[in-house]
């Protein structure tokens, strides 16, 4: 938790309580349904929560924005972002139902009112539009953009970014970018948070 407060200092008491509750909740649920690797659970706040919040540090979503988290897994980046942006609506989607049970239980336990959990592939979500799609280590950029583009509306629901896809990725992305057919804007996460664990992590943005 301290590592979150190293970079953010304007949380409400409710937000502080919600963030503080995540460790015990994920430790408890992870023993039943493995949503976070065993070696990472002790680094939950740095490797999962803070990593997710790099999106919040880069893009200030406007109140009323609608966000879809593609392949949310255990709720990242969606849960930390929903805590950070209480006036933004989040749809957390994943095709693996047992992981979503954990996400729903965590959201309910900390009283997140701005989160909806759906057991669905993103390409099966019809008749719904969003301002941003977010994702964390789910699929190649070409696939993410193919899935996200149809559900994104044109607009400007962030002060820093026009509506689009914001995903967190790692490693050498040159070939992946070449294969995607798009020219993303790339921000190294270690330019946002000065932690060595983020040395090969990137925030990747594709405008709608």
Image (cartoon, rainbow, N blue to C red):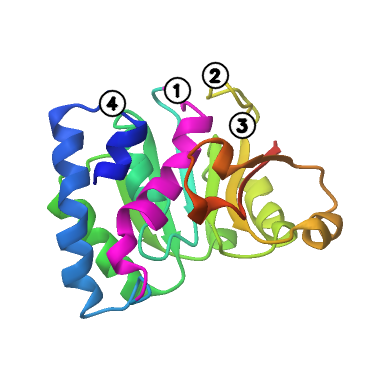
The residue that label 4 is drawn on is: 9
Q: CA distance from mark 1 to mark 4?
A: 19 Å
In the orientation shown, which residue stands out farthest toward the top?
159
Label 2 vs label 3, nearer the camera: 2
* Sequence-first disc among 3 and 4: 4
Tell me the distance, in whole angstroms, between the alpha carbons under discs 3 and 4: 27 Å
How far is mark 1 from mark 3, CA to CA?
A: 11 Å
Q: Quadrant of residue 146?
A: bottom right
Mark 1 or 2, closer to the camera = 2
Q: Secondary structure at mark 3?
A: loop
In x, y percent, where is residue 54? 48, 40
10 Å crowding of disc 2: few (<14), some (14-19), many (20+): few
- Give residue 187's position: percent from left, percent from top: 65, 39
In this rendering, the label closer to the viewer, 4 or 2: 4
Give the number of the disc on residue 159. 2
Q: Which mark is residue 62?
A: 1
- Tell me the number on the disc at residue 163: 3
Q: Residue at x 43, y 47 (%)?
A: 52
Q: Which stretch did the figure color magenta?
A: 39-62
Mark 1 and mark 3 residues within 8 Å of each other at the beta carbon: no
Would residue 154 appear left or right of 35 to someone viewing this image?
right
Look at 31% across and 43% down and name the residue there.
3
């Amino acid at each position: 938790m301290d590592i979150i407060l190293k970079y953010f200092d304007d949380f409400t008491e409710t937000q502080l309580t919600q963030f503080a509750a995540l460790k015990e909740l994920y430790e408890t649920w992870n023993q039943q349904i493995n949503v976070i690797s065993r070696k990472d659970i002790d680094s939950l706040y740095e490797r999962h929560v803070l990593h997710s919040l790099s999106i919040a540090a880069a893009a200030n979503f406007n109140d009323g924005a609608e966000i879809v988290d593609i392949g949310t897994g255990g709720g990242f980046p969606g849960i930390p972002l929903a805590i950070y942006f209480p006036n933004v609506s989040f749809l957390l989607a994943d095709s693996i139902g047992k992981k979503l049970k954990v996400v729903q239980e965590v959201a309910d336990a900390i009283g997140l009112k701005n989160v909806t959990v759906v057991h669905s592939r993103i390409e099966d979500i019809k008749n719904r539009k969003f301002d941003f799609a977010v994702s964390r280590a789910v699929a190649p950029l070409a696939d993410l953009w193919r899935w996200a583009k149809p559900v994104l509306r044109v607009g400007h629901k962030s002060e820093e970014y026009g509506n689009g896809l914001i995903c967190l990725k790692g490693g050498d992305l040159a070939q992946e970018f070449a294969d995607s057919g798009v020219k993303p804007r790339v921000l190294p996460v270690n330019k946002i948070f000065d932690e060595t664990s983020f040395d090969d992590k990137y925030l990747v943005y594709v405008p709608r």
